[in-house]
Image (spheres, rainbow, N blue to C red):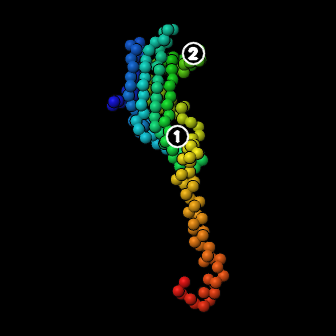
Amino acid sequence: MTLGALPQTVEVRTLAAREVALAGVVDPARLTRLSTAIVAVNNPVVVNADFYRDEEARYVLALQVSAEVLVTCQRCLSTLEQTVTSETQLAVVWTDEQAGQLPPRYEPLVADAEIELWEVVEDELLLALPTFSYHSDADCGSKTGVQAPVRENEAESQASPEKDNPFSVLKTLKGDTNS
Ligand SMILES: [Zn+2]
């Protein structure tokens, strides 16, 4: 199934009154705030947006967002892939005061006519990102943390005979160039 691009801006109350359901993708290159928070977004961000009016006539946007992102492992500092998902019920309000009166199941979306749907998607992804990311124990450090010390040890064991062997000094004194 190939999804088209999600509209960048929508008339949120109009769509809610018509009970429109949108599914689409957002090009991660357009989500600049997200790009600065992580290493990369691997694929287009997949979005399902259902607009409807609830039983108390609120305009609601039920938003499902999913993205595959590359983040930095805080233990070994190499990258790891994570799927970030978010499911939110956003109630459209006119003012901050109305936002404060919403039932707890809703997040407020303060809007006049149009909303920047891509920005709402980006906000939800930023909220859903884990603060710290780690590989699983088996995978962590497989690129740097384990191999690097082994290479160091090999280098030491190759270097030390020359450095510590007292006979190497004698060879130098005798002018032996065959070693
Ligand atoms: Zn790691």
Which of the labelled discs sits on residue 85, or is there none? none
The image quarter containing residue 116 is top left
- Amino acid under disc 2: Leu
Instruction: Give the answer, above or below, for where 87 lies relative to 173.
Output: above
Image position, residue 34 (x, y; %): 49, 37
* Residue at x-position 50% and y-position 34%: 84
Q: Would the CB of label 1 be found within 8 Å of ligand 1?
A: no
* Residue at x-position 39% and y-position 31%: 25
Q: Would the CB of label 2 be found within 8 Å of ligand 1?
A: no
* Secondary structure of residue under mark 1: helix
Q: Which residue is mark 2?
A: 102
* Secondary structure of residue under mark 2: loop
Question: Of marks 1 and 2, which one's residue comes earlier in the chain?
Answer: 1
Nearest the eye: 111 or 140? 140
Q: State how far apart marks 1 and 2 are (Cα).
A: 30 Å
Q: Which residue is mark 1?
A: 37
Task: Quarter of the image for the C terminus: give it.
Answer: bottom right
Task: Quarter of the image for the N terminus: give it.
Answer: top left
Instruction: Give the answer, above or below, for where 155 lies relative to 57.
Output: below
Q: Is residue 156 left or right of residue 123?
A: right
Is any part of residue 30 visible from this angle? no
How many C-alpha atoms fall within 10 Å of the one at disc 2: few (<14), some, or many (≥20)? some
* Residue at x-position 51% and y-position 8%: 56
Q: Report the residue that reaches farthest toward the front.
A: 138
Image position, residue 165 (x, y; %): 64, 79
